[in-house]
Image (tube, rainbow, N blue to C red):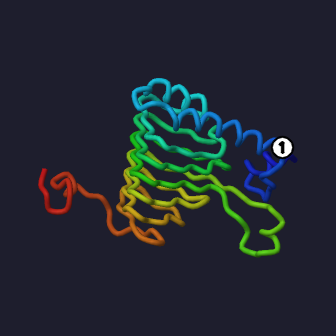
Amino acid sequence: MTEKEKMINGELYLSFGEELLKERQDAKELIFDFNTLRPTKIEEGKEIITKLFGEIGKEFFIEPPFRCDYGYNISVGKNFYSNYNCIILDCAKVTIGDNVLFAPNVSLFTAGHPIDAEIRNSGVEYAFPITIGNNVWIGGGVIVTPGVTIGDNVVIGAGSVVTKDIPAGVIAVGNPCKVIREISENDKKYYFKNNRM
């Protein structure tokens, strides 16, 4: 089994073999092109992202700078917006649904390293998928860790560190991120705190 196959299958793997290193370098070339485009070159930027990602739906906008490892493990639905400084370590599959918003500095980390120092020092790492449902808003500075699923219609509060699955239809916040309440019909009346629609 190749190191890439191990990576995709959630097994311990070495990331600095020839194949994976080349694929990361190829992705960095596209990312460099994207991040250095003039702001008016919107269509050119979309072409680069379409070439980089495994799949991306209609109507997306990613504010540079953006970073990822491979790109081909990222699948995004329609109507996606990512604000500045998004990082996606896509050593495993990252699936993002329709109508998803990322605030600045959102980081999705599928990759991790063993806890034991001796094993970690051997150079191995692992990766587990991240899945984000439809109609999700992820606040500024949120970190999502390996193996996490976030359900549909969720709001993740700014600064949260999401280490466990989050069910659909809730607001969750904190480090570690926890559900604070369900989203209800009452949320249609207010757009921010006590400010009415």
Question: In the figure, 189 relative to 39: above or below?
Answer: below
Q: Is residue 24 left or right of residue 86?
A: right
Front position in the image: 141 or 30: 30
Question: In the figure, 137 relative to 24: above or below?
Answer: below
Residue at disc 1, secondary structure = helix
Residue tagged by mark 1?
18
The residue drawn where x is 48% and y is 72% is: 176
Amino acid of disc 1: Glu
Front position in the image: 57 or 152: 57
Q: State the image quarter where residue 172 is shown.
A: bottom left
Q: Tell me the crowding category of disc 1: few under 14, some 14 to 19, or many 20 or more residues within 10 angstroms, Cα based.
A: few
- How many marks on residues? 1
The residue drawn where x is 48% and y is 55% is: 150
The residue drawn where x is 62% and y is 52% is: 129
Can see residue 156? yes
Residue 125 in the image, given as x and y percentages of width and height: 75, 60
Q: Is residue 157 left or right of residue 114?
A: left
Can see residue 53? no
The residue drawn where x is 54% and y is 66% is: 163
Front position in the image: 169 or 164: 164
Residue 152 in the image, given as x and y percentages of width and height: 42, 50
Q: State the image quarter where residue 118 is shown.
A: bottom right
Q: State the image quarter where residue 192 is shown.
A: bottom left
Residue 145 in the image, given as x and y percentages of width and height: 57, 61
